[in-house]
Amino acid sequence: MPDKIDQNLTFAFAEESRTAARDAVFSLKAAEEGFRQLARLFRAMANAGLVHRQRFLLLMRGKISATEENLKEAFQNKNRVVEECYPGMIEDASEASKAVKKAFLQSRKTDAEHAEFYRKAMENMFSKDYMEYYVCQICGHIHEDFAPENCPVCQAVVSRFKKID
Ligand SMILES: [Zn+2]
């Protein structure tokens, strides 16, 4: 029953992604508490989770829709997060935590920018342009062609940008 297998692959992919992210956070906490070896163990687990995820991804590749459809889905998903998810979370964070509110506000802003990238990409899907992308490692802002002196969203300095291969 291929449908069940596809569902299981999708589930395993999501689960490994979530677990790897959790293990990365656990590693930070262990390091903060002075458990160097345990921090390293959690980092190893996080990396192993990414290996699993990549393996499942390769098996899923043949079952995934064509890129035109994926762009549309990615665009809609970004818009949904920006319009429906972040506003309430920002509101909830307003009183409790300035840092969480800032993270949600900046993530909402960069996700709105990301939606615009997808929108433009859908319009220019067959363009031969091959531009560079630089991602701010603080807020997730994506800059085209070059890394700016300061991130326009979070003001991080140029060295905090990562060039994407
Ligand atoms: Zn930034």
Image (cartoon, grey):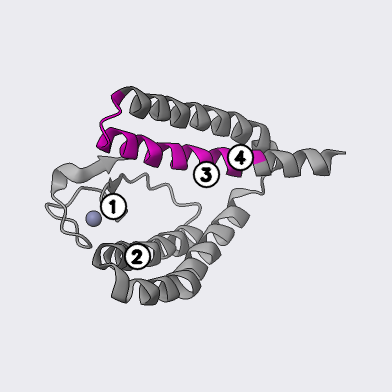
| Mark 1 residue type | Glu
Assess mark 1: CB under 8 A from ligand 1?
Answer: no
Magenta-colored segment: predominant secondary structure: helix
Q: Is residue 29 above or below residue 36?
A: below
Q: Nearer the viewer, mark 3 or mark 4?
A: 3
> Which range of residues does the magenta coloring cover?
12-36
Q: Amino acid at mark 3?
A: Arg
Residue 47 in percent (x, y) is at: 45, 28
Quadrant housing residue 16 = top right
Question: Would you say 90 lies left or right of 67 here?
Answer: left
**Residue 29 in the image: above or below residue 144:** above
> Going by the image, does 120 lie left or right of 144?
right
Circle 4 residue: 13
Q: Residues within 10 Å of mark 1 (few under 14, many from 20)?
A: few
Question: According to the image, label 1 marks what residue?
Answer: 144
**CA separation in Å, label 3 and label 1:** 29 Å
Image quarter (top left, top right, bottom left or bottom right) of the C terminus: top left
**Amino acid type indicated by mark 4:** Phe
Say whether marks 3 and 1 touch (CB < 8 Å): no
User: For the point 30% across and 28% down, which residue is it?
Assistant: 35
Q: Nearer the viewer, mark 3 or mark 1?
A: 3
N-terminal of the two: label 3 or label 4? 4
User: For the residues marked 3 and 4, what is the alpha-carbon distance in whole angstroms?
Assistant: 9 Å
